[in-house]
Amino acid sequence: MARGGRARCAAGFTLIEMIIVLTLAGLLLALVPPRLSGALAAAEVRSAARELASALRYARSRAVTRHAEVLLTLDTERRRYRVSGSRWRALPEDLQLKLTTARSERRSRGVGSIRFYPDGTGTGGQIALGSGARRFVVDVSWLTGRIAIYTGSS
């Protein structure tokens, strides 16, 4: 006993309290990874949509500055694209792609192009990207050559 007749209290946690806390922490950690993988998939699709939109803007700009037609060619089966005169660039493997473009710009199954002219206009088209429930559409106006990204399906 301590002075004055009071019992001395030990500071700290009991074994049962520690077991409960560790069990709850383990359960929370088990639930978090599935949510993070969904967030990563959404970020990956958004990133791919922005990358394609950027490549399309580059192709349009190049057509205007060089006074020549420039194509962005997309291979939906191999998940890759390129701008005229450039090397192929890969897109994520699990990405679902669909290209809607002018019939004259279809090369073969799964391969097609969006063409930009020296005046900034183009053949127009859409590239739909998706993974899981997340969807984006990169839209190219044939009249103005304007490139925009929309959420969801078209």
Image (tube, rainbow, N blue to C red):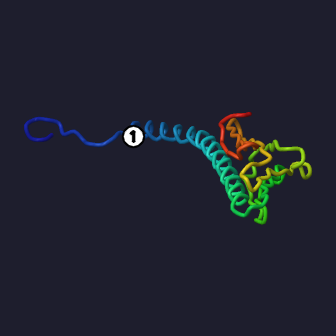
Give the camera-side residue of 77 and 84.
Answer: 84
Residue 55 left/right relative to 110: left
Q: Position of residue 90 (x, y in %)?
A: 74, 58
Q: Position of residue 19 (x, y in %)?
A: 44, 39
The residue wearing badge 1 is: 15
Give the camera-side residue of 61 and 25.
Answer: 61
Q: Is residue 69 above or below residue 23?
A: below
Residue 53 left/right relative to 12: right
Q: Residue at x 10, y 35 (%)?
A: 5
Residue 132 in which image quadrant: top right
Q: Return the residue found at the far left.
A: 4
Q: Residue at x 76, y 53 (%)?
A: 116
Give the camera-side residue of 97 and 139.
Answer: 139
Residue 71 in which image quadrant: bottom right
Q: Position of residue 75 (x, y in %)?
A: 82, 53
Amino acid type indicated by mark 1? Leu
